[in-house]
Amino acid sequence: MRASLLQLSSGDDPHENLATVRALMAEARAGGADFILTPEVTNCVSASRSHQNAVLAPEESDPVLAGLRDEAARLGTWLLIGSLALKTDDPDGRFANRSFLIDDTGTIRARYDKIHMFDVDVSPEETYRESDGFRPGTRAVLAETPWGQLGLSICYDIRFPHLYRRLAQAGADILTVPAAFSHVTGAAHWESLLRARAIETGCVVLAPAQTGTHAASTGKARRTHGHSLVVAPWGEVLADGGTAPGIVSVDLDLSKVAQARKRVPSLRHDREIDGP
């Protein structure tokens, strides 16, 4: 299985972002990719709620989703759209941050709405209130692929290990963690968290990331960490995308999942605990 992670620097124009992703998908497929993955908010990176309201669409009419489904079918490859920011019919007007697993015919095989919202004060100059604009999801999602079971997650979810343990104990072989990770927290925690989740679960972790300073026609420009990572079930980093946009491809041996779990079968060693 060859997985190709697309490291993007998406701006706030969904149509421009779609063209960029389609070109990179074609390049990855020409390089032998069986499974292509994009980062969080592939369609629009924006800190402006008014701009998001102007350019985003519901799932059923979103041009980026339609275009990427068409491209997956044209290329005959599986695709994880890390996430799209989408309008919903929620009375409060909040968006969904939704990941899509697309098969090689362009069919949607799974959807996952980000559960944990990034509501943090990184510094006096860098604060986030994701829940102001996005509604949280409520369901963990596991999906079948030709290579094994895939557990879906998005970005800030990585700080909640119980989600990944639950996915692994339900059968996940591969965990996806598409992200638009903060530059500050990414430098401190990104690799450590991804390696920890791989080691704890014995899963392959695929983490395509947004990178750099993102073009913004309205509002403050965001800066993200980059460093798309592929982590083996034993915790080794198999590939690191650095900070430039591009493609990170790795040939994966999924038999390593069973090997890691045989060596340390901790997924079967849960105990009931009293207290505190």
Image: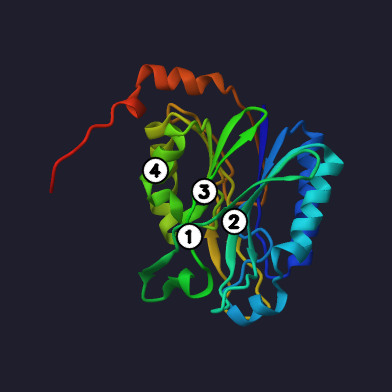
Nearer to us: label 4 or label 2: 2
Compared to residue 58, the image places residue 1 above or below, namely above
Q: Quadrant of residue 166?
A: top left
Indicate the position of residue 31 as horizontal and vertical percent values.
Answer: 78, 33
Q: SS for tag 3?
A: loop
Cβ atoms under marks 3 and 4 closer than 8 Å: no
Who comes first in sequence, dot 1 or dot 4? 1
Q: Name the residue: 36% across, 71% down.
A: 123
Alpha-carbon span between mark 3 and mark 4: 17 Å
* Marks 3 and 1 in Cβ contact (< 8 Å): no
The mark that comes first in sequence, 2 or 1, is: 2
Asked if the residue at tag 2 contacts the one at tag 3, i.e. Cβ–Cβ closer than 8 Å, the answer is: no
Q: According to the image, label 2 marks what residue?
A: 40
- The residue identified by callout 4 is 192
Distance from Cα at disc 3 to Cα at disc 2: 10 Å
For mark 1, what is the residue? 183
Q: Residue at x 80, y 42 (%)?
A: 27
What amino acid is at disc 4? Ser
Amino acid at the residue labelled 1: His
| Secondary element at tag 2 | loop
Q: Which residue is mark 3?
A: 153
Q: For label 3, count other residues whose C-alpha is less than 10 Å away and answer few (under 14), some (14-19) or many (20+).
A: many
Image check: 255 left or right of 193? right
